[in-house]
């Protein structure tokens, strides 16, 4: 019994560790047409089946360049806001009070916006990612996913749809199923009980 319990705990630890270290690509667009642009950038997308995901990161891609023309590098600038509906205000006006607000990035690491680990992205859901500052040397301009790119190209510098899709990558870790989580927690807390019972039997 004790051996099976230990095996369960070890399996659970390995299970959770695999989710903690693995980042899955949830959605991306890597095609490019035309040259670089420089404006505040946004992109809408619909997540695929699967998930849900936490430990979310997002990045734009530049156009590449000498000596590796066309090889994209992750880029991020300012703060990235996540909304559940289209936004037509200015980049600077984005805030937690914006209608449709879900979350905003907490930091930038490796050219990627990093969101709070508590943020959970749902499958089969349309999201809007919008920067509050200019994203230099951004690229895209091909329609390859169900979504729309946005830039502060409207009257007065407000967000408006632009042709094609931006080059971007959205990543996250799959959230474990609740049933598996409950089993692991139960195994963790019952292990000392079984250990003490076994010790008393031996004594």
Image (cartoon, rainbow, N blue to C red):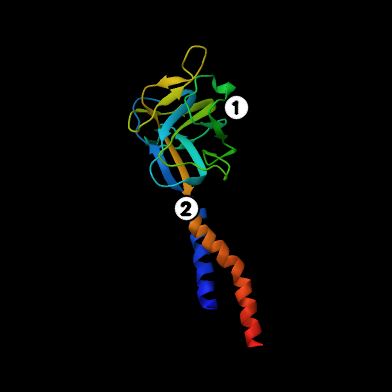
Give the mark toward the camera: 1 or 2: 1
Nearer to me, 133 or 197: 197
Of 197 and 152, nearer the camera is 197
Which quadrant does the C terminus fall into? bottom right
As drawn, the residue found furthest toward the bottom would be 203
Compare marks 1 and 2 and give the one earlier in the sequence: 2
- In percent of width and height, residue 170 lies at 45, 40
The residue tagged 1 is: 95
Tell whether 178 sits left or right of 139: right
Marks 2 and 1: in contact by CB < 8 Å?
Answer: no
- Horizontal side of 96 relative to 23 (left or right) equals right
Q: Position of residue 33 (x, y in %)?
A: 34, 27
Residue that appears at 48% across and 41% down: 121
Helix, strand or loop status at disc 2: loop
Q: Label 2, on which residue?
A: 22
What secondary structure is marked by label 1?
Answer: loop
The part of the image, by quadrant, that contains residue 201 is bottom right
Label 1 – label 2 distance at C-alpha:
30 Å
- Number of marks: 2
Q: Which labelled disc corresponds to residue 108?
A: none
Q: Is the residue marked by circle 2 packed among few (<14), some (14-19), or many (20+) residues within 10 Å?
A: few
Q: Residues within 10 Å of mark 1 (few under 14, many from 20)?
A: some
Of 60 and 66, the residue lying toward us: 60
Residue 104 horizontal/vertical position (percent):
57, 34
Residue at the far top: name it. Answer: 155
- In the image, is 100 to the left or to the right of 70? right
Q: Residue at x 52, y 43 (%)?
A: 120
Q: Position of residue 86 (x, y in %)?
A: 47, 25
């Amino acid at each position: 019994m004790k051996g099976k319990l230990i095996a369960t705990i070890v399996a659970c630890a390995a299970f959770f560790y695999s989710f903690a270290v693995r980042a899955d690509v949830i959605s991306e667009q890597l095609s490019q047409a035309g040259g670089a642009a420089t404006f505040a950038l946004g992109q809408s997308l619909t997540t695929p089946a699967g998930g849900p995901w936490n430990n979310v990161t997002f990045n734009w891609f530049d156009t590449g360049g000498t000596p590796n023309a066309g090889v994209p590098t992750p880029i991020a600038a300012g703060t990235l806001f996540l909304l559940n509906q289209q936004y037509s205000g200015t980049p600077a006006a984005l805030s937690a009070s914006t209608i449709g607000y879900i979350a905003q990035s907490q930091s930038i690491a490796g050219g990627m916006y990093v969101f709070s680990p508590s943020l959970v992205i749902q499958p089969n859901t349309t999201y809007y990612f919008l920067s509050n500052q200019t994203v230099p040397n951004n690229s895209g301009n091909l329609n390859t996913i169900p979504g729309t790119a946005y830039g502060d190209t409207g009257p007065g510098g407000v967000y408006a749809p632009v042709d094609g899709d931006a080059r971007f990558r959205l990543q996250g870790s799959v959230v474990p199923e609740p049933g598996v989580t409950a089993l692991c927690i139960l195994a963790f807390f019952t292990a000392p009980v079984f250990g003490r019972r076994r010790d008393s039997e031996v004594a």
